[in-house]
Image (cartoon, rainbow, N blue to C red):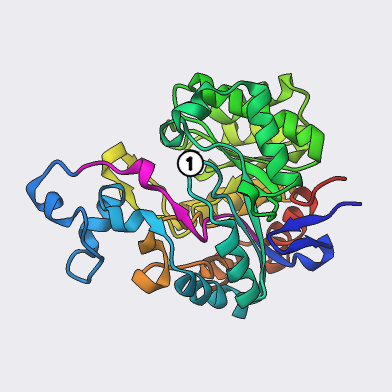
Amino acid sequence: MPMLRTVLGDVDPAEMGITLPHEHVLCDSSAWFSEPTDPEGALLADAEPTLENLWWMRQHPNSNRFLLYLDDVDIAVRELDAYARLGGRTVVDLSCVGLGGQPEQLAVVSRRTGLNLVLGSGFYVDASLSDDIRAASVEQLAEHIIRDLTEGVGGTGIRAGVIGEIGMSHPLTPVEERSLRAAARASLETGAAISVHTAAHAVEMDSALRAADILGEEGADLSRVIMGHMDTTLHRPDYHRRVLDLGCYVEFDLFGHELFESENDFICPGDYAKTKAVSRLVAEGYESQILLSHDCCFKIQLRTWGGYGYAHLLQNILPRFVLEGVPESVVLQMMTENPARVLPLQQ
C-alpha cells in the first residue's frame, strides 16, 4: 500500500492535500558561494539584506554568504504558517547530502506547523560533495540512500521519504553519474520516487534526457521520476514534450525565483513566462505530469527578507493561471493529485 514517508512517520496519501514537491526549509547552499569580484560586492559578501542593498543581492545571490543558509526554525515555522493558512498541507525538503539537511530540526518544524514534511536523500551536485562521497561506488551510494529511507538519516531514526534532489552539472561528472545510478537502484529497492536537479544553468543541454537514459539503464520506472528546474528551458517546449513523453514528471519549481545569478550568467525566466509555458502544456493534455513549486533556498526568497515565500503559488500564481485559461481545478490537480500519485513510497 502506498505511503507518504514524512519526518514524523508514514502518512496516508489521502492526507497529503496541497503539496510543494521541491523546496528547502532548512538547508546550506554554501557550495554555490562565489566570491564577489567588484569592490562594492566585497563589502556586501557577508552583509544582511536591507532595503538599501537588496538590489545587489537580487543580482548576486550566490555572492552573499548570509543568503545561502536557511537555518532558523522560528523563521521556518513562520514562513510555512503562511502557506498552511492558504490550505497547504505538505512540503518536500530536498536538502540531501551536499545541502545540509537537518532531519531533527525539520521534525520540530513539522510538529509546530502541523504540516507533512518530507526529507530527501541522495547526493547533490559534485561541487557540494566530500572527497569520500566522490570516491564511493554506485553500490555504496545506493546503500546510503536505502539506509536513509528505511532506517533514518545519520543515525537520527528520522527517515527520508524521497530520493533527491539528485545533482547534475554540465558536463556530468563521474560521481554524479554514479549518484543517478544509485538513485535508480535505491528506488527499485524502496519504492521511493526520484527527484532530479537537472543542470539548470546549461539551458541548451538535454540534461533531463541524459538523466532518463541513465536511470532507464538501471531499470528505474520513469513514471516515478521528477525532472526538476524545467522552467529554465522555457524556450525549448519540444524538449519538455520529449521528457514528458518518456513518462517522467516535469517540474516547474522556480516560481517566485526571478533572480539574475550574475555569477553564472544565468537568468531565471519570470513567473509570467512560466505560467504561459505551463498553460501551453496543459492545453496539450500533459496536466497529469506537471508539478509546481518554488525551490526556496535563498533567504531573500522568504517573506522575512522581502521575498514571496512558500505561499506564492497559492496566493499570487493561481489567479494568473486562471487568467491564462487554466481552471483552478486543474492548477489544484497539479498541486494535489499529481504529487499524491508520484511521491508516496510504492511498498
**Other residues around mark 1 within 10 Å, as few (<14) / some (14–19) / many (≥20):** many
Magenta segment: does it hold 163? Answer: no
Q: Relative to residue 85, is residue 63 drawn left or right?
A: left
Q: In the rendered view, does 171 fall on the left or right side of 18?
A: left
- 12 up-or-down from 339: above or below: below
Q: Position of residue 114 (x, y in %)?
A: 67, 75
- Check the image and name the residue furthest to the right: 1
**280 and 61: which is toward the camera:** 61
The relative height of residue 169 versus residue 200 in the rendered view (above or below) is above
Q: Residue 127: give x, y in percent of width and height.
A: 41, 32
The x and y percentages for residue 29 are 41, 48
Relative to 160, 277 lies left or right? left
Left or right side of 264 for 255: right
- Which residue is drawn at the image coordinates 38% and 62% (left, top)? 299
Q: Which residue is mark 1?
A: 98
Residue 45 seen anywhere in this rendered image of the structure: yes
As helix, strand or loop, the secondary structure at mark 1 comes to: loop
Q: Residue at x 60, y 80 (%)?
A: 85
Q: What is the span of residues highlighted in magenta in the rendered image?
A: 20-35
Residue 221, quarter of the rendered image: top right
Residue visible at 52% across and 29% down in the picture: 133
* Residue 224 percent location from the top left of the image: 75, 40
